[in-house]
Image (tube, rainbow, N blue to C red):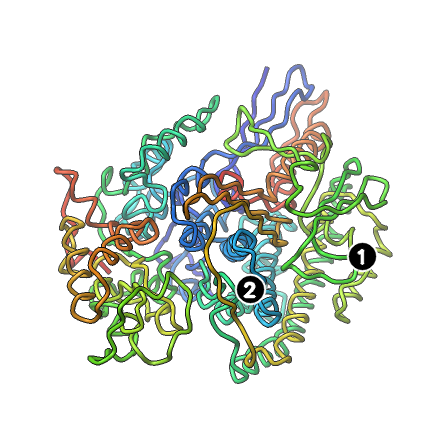
């Protein structure tokens, strides 16, 4: 293994998150020969980001005042900044959205002496700094990490999860009720929507290799909405999903609505769309989205 | 008064050590979690059956343990028992997590401390590293990847796995896939033992150099593995007392009678005690509470450990050596289990959701993990996550105090203190995301 000092410098800044993105990055060792890792507290002891970094990956959402500080400092020391994972793109699971009970309970419990202050919510990082590239996923696969680091301009990313799933959509198999969140016996090779699962792969950006749906688990939308729904209100994604279920199933619309609004899906489905409701934030163009 | 703050690296999450020194005497040594995940708040009001997708996100390092504990807690609420095959597949999944975690802690987090390197990659570049026939970093990542691949095989996803479902697992493991995995383990097991031997040797050299193994007073030890059955998909909690005798075991339903959990003023993580006393969980606790692992190579390492250091063993750095024993065990055990038929048979039972309170226990790499949910009208009313790292908090503080006293004296503060602080904390392999659930 050669880690020549001439290789471009590469750093990973972790804000408030679960380290899952870092773990995923470690699952690919390909970067070792392409980059010189200069800062990543999970694996390297170094107290600051050097000021001549080529690429800075930022994982986690902005949850504390310290996160804002570290993020701004990181931005000033890198040529290119990549937002990695659901939390960096939306605040992630830690965002409260309309859940005021959770927010109050959290903020009440989160007062400590001489500790970083918890902000009222978990925020996406582009609320505070410019982002050059977005890499959504919870977490992004090691392959997507390598694409983001090596050649994002020429990446060919599947438009939606269905393109990579390979399960067949049938016209004559129309369920009349929801099969359940994760129960039931999954038939191989047949679309999960045909089997009554609330799979949102039809509206979710691909690139993950349909890791969940191929073995029979409904897509929860962790890569976020596909290109047509970027920078749109959440309603657009949800409306598209309603159309899919109306076209492919005979499940009553109210039942579909209730599930689409449920927490496990809203964690991910709203991850780009919600964000645009803050007026003066930059648009996330599809060119910047991997 | 001087307050020294050491930010920590090579652990999961954001934490620091703060030491107060006055007139060359140490007054306080604290380990502080600097972030708060807050999942016990987020999940209020969430439909119960959806929580198994949400709670793995507490921690990307420990997502497997959280997913299985979560499913087991709901199975307890719904009063169902998964079929034996599902339990075996869950065990393979948890073994995968143990391999991934112990390889990460051993090689990425703590091996660099043995030579005062800043990372495994720097260690590989050093003279000692280059003298090896192979690159330590590449070999270490290969061993770690076996864990990742096992999680994918048994869990469907390498982080935030999906195959463990309420009532069982969603599918078996195909013979062909199991055979491929067995071949990989057979090929790499000698590499793993060689790495563990190198690690052991480097640790002995380090112990001689610094003149200590991180000696500390005996404590209580907490684990949910059995004395002669290291099953991670566990049922009961066991406690060893400081003198080495075992206290009565207890069911996860009764944990509050034995474990007291309190908030901290200066940290986002709480602290727990066993009947008011300091306790320790993680690798050393399990090994102290184990007679036999049941696999040949791991049992040989276990005998060597007990013969060299006694039983129970108490010094801090033994946590690291015990992770090496467990890494070998998990590889051997995974191979044994994959040799059985995990493809055919019932993998799942049906269930009818209902309200109630349920507890789910697993032995996570850092110790026993309990999820407790109260379900009302199909929604989560309250959720508690009883986290192994929290059990170690008081023990970490005391060990830091011992280290601080060793390196602060009449001649001032020895520069070795910073390294000692890192070694002590990493020995406990704390996980801050989990600890601040």
Quadrant hosting residue A204: bottom left
Which residue is nearer to you in this view: B147 or A100? A100
Total number of numbered labels?
2
Position of residue A226 measured from the top left corner of the image (x, y, whole percent): 20, 61
Vertical side of B426 occupied by B231: above or below? below
Position of residue B339 measured from the top left corner of the image (x, y, whole percent): 64, 80
**Placement of the N terminus of chain B among the 4 image quadrants:** top right
Quadrant hosting residue B293: bottom right
Helix, strand or loop under label 2: helix
Vertical side of B182 occupied by B329: above or below? above
Is B24 left, or right, of B45 in this rendering?
Answer: right
Which residue is nearer to you in this view: A278 or A236? A236
Residue B135 at least partly seen: no
Residue at 54% in and 81% down: B180
* Pointer 1 chain: B
Do marks 2 and 1 share a subunit? yes
Position of residue A253 measured from the top left corner of the image (x, y, whole percent): 20, 59
Q: Kindly identify which residue carries mark 1.
A: B305
Q: Kindly identify which residue carries mark 2.
A: B144
Position of residue A114 measured from the top left corner of the image (x, y, whole percent): 47, 22
Mark 2 or mark 1: whose residue is earlier in sequence? 2
């Amino acid at each position: 293994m050669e880690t020549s000092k001439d290789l471009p410098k590469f750093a990973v800044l972790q804000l408030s998150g679960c380290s899952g993105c870092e773990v995923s990055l470690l699952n690919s060792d390909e970067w070792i020969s392409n980059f010189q890792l200069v800062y990543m507290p999970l694996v390297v002891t170094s107290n600051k980001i050097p000021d001549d970094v080529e690429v800075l990956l930022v994982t986690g959402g902005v949850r504390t005042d310290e996160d804002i500080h570290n993020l701004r400092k990181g931005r000033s020391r890198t040529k290119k900044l990549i937002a990695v994972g659901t939390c960096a793109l939306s605040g992630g699971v830690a965002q409260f959205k309309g859940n005021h009970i959770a927010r109050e309970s959290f903020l009440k419990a989160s007062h400590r002496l001489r500790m970083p202050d918890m902000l009222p919510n978990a925020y996406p990082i582009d609320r505070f700094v410019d982002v050059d590239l977005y890499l959504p996923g919870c977490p992004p696969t090691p392959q997507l990490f390598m694409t983001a680091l090596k050649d994002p301009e020429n990446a060919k990313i599947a438009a939606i999860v269905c393109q990579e799933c390979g399960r067949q959509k049938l016209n004559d198999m129309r369920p009349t009720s929801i099969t359940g969140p994760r129960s039931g016996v999954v038939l191989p090779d047949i679309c999960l929507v045909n089997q009554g699962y609330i799979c949102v792969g039809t509206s979710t950006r691909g690139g993950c290799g349909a890791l969940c749906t191929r073995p029979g688990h409904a897509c929860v939308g962790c890569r976020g909405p596909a290109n047509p729904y970027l920078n749109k209100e959440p309603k657009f994604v949800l409306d598209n999903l309603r159309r899919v279920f109306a076209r492919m199933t005979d499940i009553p619309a109210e039942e579909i609505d209730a599930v689409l609004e449920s927490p496990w899906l809203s964690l991910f489905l709203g991850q780009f769309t919600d964000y645009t409701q803050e007026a003066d934030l930059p648009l996330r163009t599809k060119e910047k989205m991997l | 008064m001087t307050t020294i703050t050491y930010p920590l690296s090579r652990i999961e999450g954001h934490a620091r050590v703060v030491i107060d020194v006055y007139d060359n005497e140490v007054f306080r040594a604290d380990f502080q979690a600097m972030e708060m995940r807050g999942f016990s708040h987020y999940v209020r009001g969430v439909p119960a059956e959806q929580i198994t997708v949400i709670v793995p996100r507490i921690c990307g390092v420990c997502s497997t343990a959280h997913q299985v504990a979560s499913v087991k807690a709901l199975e307890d609420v719904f009063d169902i028992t998964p079929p034996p095959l599902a339990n075996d597949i869950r065990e393979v999944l948890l073994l995968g997590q143990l391999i991934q975690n112990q390889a990460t802690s051993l090689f990425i987090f703590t091996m660099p401390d043995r030579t005062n390197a800043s990372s495994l990659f720097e260690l590989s570049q050093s003279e000692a590293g280059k003298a090896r026939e192979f690159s330590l970093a590449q070999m270490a990542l290969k061993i770690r990847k076996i864990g990742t691949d096992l999680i994918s095989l048994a869990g469907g996803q390498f982080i935030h796995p999906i195959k463990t479902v309420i009532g069982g697992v969603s599918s078996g493991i195909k013979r062909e896939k199991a055979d491929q995995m067995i071949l990989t383990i057979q090929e790499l097991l000698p590499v793993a033992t060689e790495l563990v031997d190198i690690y052991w040797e480097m640790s002995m050299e380090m112990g001689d150099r610094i003149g200590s193994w991180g000696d500390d007073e005996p404590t209580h030890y907490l684990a949910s593995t059995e004395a002669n059955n290291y099953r991670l998909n566990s049922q009961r909690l066991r406690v060893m007392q400081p003198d080495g005798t075992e206290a009565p075991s207890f069911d996860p339903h009764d944990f509050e009678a034995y474990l007291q959990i309190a908030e901290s003023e200066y940290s986002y993580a709480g602290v727990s005690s066993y009947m008011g006393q300091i306790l320790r969980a993680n690798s050393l606790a399990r090994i102290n509470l184990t007679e036999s692992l049941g696999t040949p190579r791991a049992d040989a390492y276990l005998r060597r450990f007990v013969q060299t250091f006694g039983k129970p063993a108490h010094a801090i750095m033994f946590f690291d050596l015990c992770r090496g024993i467990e890494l070998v065990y998990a590889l051997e055990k995974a191979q044994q289990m994959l040799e059985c038929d995990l493809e055919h048979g019932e993998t799942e039972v049906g269930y009818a959701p209902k309200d109630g309170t349920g507890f789910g226990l697993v032995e996570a790499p850092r110790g026993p993990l309990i999820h407790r949910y109260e379900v009302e009208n199909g929604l989560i009313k309250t959720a508690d996550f009883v986290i192994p790292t929290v059990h170690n908090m008081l023990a970490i503080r005391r060990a830091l105090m011992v280290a601080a006293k060793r390196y602060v004296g009449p001649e001032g503060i020895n520069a070795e203190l910073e390294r000692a602080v890192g070694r002590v904390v990493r020995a406990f392999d704390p996980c801050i995301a989990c600890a601040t659930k």
